Image: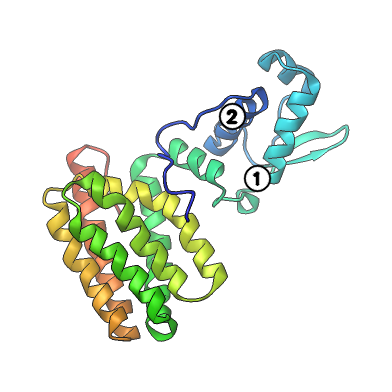
Amino acid sequence: MNNTGHRDYRQPPERKSQHARIVHDLGMRIVAGEEFKPGDRLPAEATLLTEYEVSRPVLREAVRVLVAKGLVLSRQRAGATVRPRSDWHLLDPDVLYWLIQSKPQAEFVNTLMMVRRVFEPAAAALAARVATDEALASVKEAYDGMEAATTADEILEPDLAFHRRIAEATGNDLLAYIGNMLSLALRESIKLSSKHANTHALSLPRHKAILTALLNRDPLGAQQATLVQLKETGIDISEVLEESGLGSLE
């Protein structure tokens, strides 16, 4: 069962421990890129101890978490240095949350749509070639959930499952992992596009075309249907952003 699909990445996750609070704050400040840029050193340990009013072990544990997420490099006596963005673990749930929070909505969604255009058509084509009947039945089950939904909120989870299960249907563990991690960001895209009028009526035929191609074992058809779905979704999102005065997608 996917355990990543229920966090709302525009609502701060619950934080209980002191070190988690520090991780969240420093992580946001690093990813935002205004206060700390790649190559910059974080403030000295003594400064951070005073700022956060915590013990040295708590602070060091927080820094270890940031190291594990690829955000900083910590060396004895040299302190912690912000790593290049290319080293960040961008699919880590926390790093992804900070990224979404720090970027303008249009910029983040545009980045996501570029990734989707590279990943999803190829995954759909592969799934059409190699998926087991059981895997395709799982994709159809997700589509049936979308069809049965009566509100934008109800369609969200089966829509996420539809895309995630196509990646899983490739039988490639790495592609399945990428699809699962992308679903964290995809949630934001779907929630945004769902603000478009008649979103349910618009979304179903696009997904049905992908499903039909998969069930027909038609790789080219699955690839093309996915490209069409992404293109039209991008148009929907652009209209929503423009109506909200938040710009548009490229």
Q: Tell me the quarter of the picture where residue 94 sits.
A: top right
Look at the numbered disc 2 and give the secondary structure of its residue: loop
* Image point (50%, 76%), residue name: 171
Q: Label 1 belongs to which residue?
A: 69
Q: What amino acid is at disc 2? A: Glu
Q: Position of residue 238 (x, y in %)?
A: 23, 51
Residue closest to the eye, 91 or 45: 91
Q: Residue furthest right?
A: 77
Q: Position of residue 232 (x, y in %)?
A: 21, 62
Q: Residues within 10 Å of mark 1 (few under 14, many from 20)?
A: some
Residue closest to the eye, 196 or 241: 196
Q: What amino acid is at disc 1? A: Lys
* Image point (40%, 66%), residue name: 165
Residue closest to the eye, 82 or 94: 94
Res 35 label: 2
Q: Position of residue 1 (x, y in %)?
A: 47, 56
In the depicted structure, whether residue 53 falls above or below residue 10: above
Q: Tell me the quarter of the picture where residue 195 sits.
A: top left
* Image point (22%, 37%), residue name: 245
In the depicted structure, whether residue 125 falls above or below residue 66: below
